[in-house]
Amino acid sequence: MLDAMGVLYQPPDDVADLLIPFARQRGCTTPDGEITALYFDASMGLLRSAELWSRLGIAGAGEALDREFVAAYSLTEGAGDFLQWCAASRVRVACISNDLSEWAVARARHFGLLGLINPWTISGDVGERKPQEAIYDAFVSRSDVTGPCIFVDDRIANVRAAAALGMRGVLFGTGSTAPNPGVLAATDFRALARLVEGMRGSLSAP
């Protein structure tokens, strides 16, 4: 399982680095703290994206604004190659993300990931955010995974929560080199592929 922001996509802090500047460029005068609070509610499924844009005072059709907003993200270097390697190696890939439902779909469609990742477990659909246990449980309930599961995130609290539920936790990114007992580390997707391949080999060994 992969996290979205900070693993699949950049930047990791999309509220500060993308949403607030996007809103400001369109005349939004809502204070930063209120924008963050509204985003949090929307990521819990309490607001749809169209209502969020309206509450921020941004005019326009919700779906069009969604498409324009998600186009500002970038795919993390190596993510596409890693997903293609997973497909060729028959390694299933899922995603658990704190996100608005509409943005998660629009972003995945924009980058061509809908056919490479399944299922997508999104906080806006579940009504709970990582690191709460309920969102990990939601993934388990909607998937048919029976073997070992690796969870990859750039936030240690989310990794530890997954590890506490029996998943293999992997901290991703350049900050992953700091020691975290019981947590694996991958600085980039090449390192993650080596880690996954090594774990597959250990599981198949007699």
Image: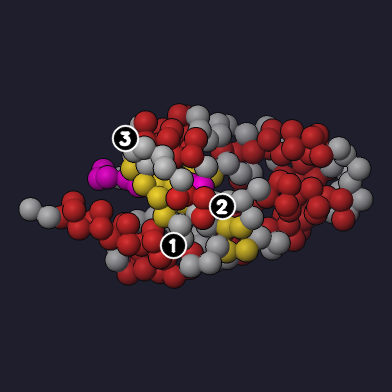
**N-terminal-most mark, 2 or 1:** 2
- Quickly name the residue at label 3: 166
Which of the colour schemes (rainbow, by chain, secondary structure, one colour) is used? secondary structure
- Quickly name the residue at label 2: 6
Please check the rendered image and state whether residue 121 is part of the magenta-colored stretch, yes or no.
no
- Disc 2 marks a residue whose amino acid type is Gly
* Magenta-highlighted residues: 146-154
**Residue at image point 56% right, 38% down:** 123
**Front residue of 68 and 77:** 77
- Disc 3 marks a residue whose amino acid type is Gly
Local crowd size for mark 3, using a 10 Å CA cut-off: few (<14), some (14–19), many (≥20): few
**N-terminal-most mark, 3 or 2:** 2
Query: Residues under labels 2 and 1: Cα distance?
Result: 12 Å
Please check the rendered image and state whether residue 151 is part of the magenta-colored stretch, yes or no.
yes
x, y percentage for residue 98?
58, 41
x, y percentage for residue 128?
55, 31
Q: Is disc 1 placed on a helix, strand or loop?
A: helix
**Residue at image point 88% right, 54% down:** 26
Query: Residues under labels 3 and 2: Cα distance?
Result: 23 Å
- CB atoms of marks 3 and 2 within 8 Å: no
**Residue at image point 36% right, 47% down:** 184
- Quickly name the residue at label 1: 189
Is 205 drawn above or below residue 180 in the view shown?
Answer: below
Is 106 drawn above or below residue 124 in the view shown?
Answer: below
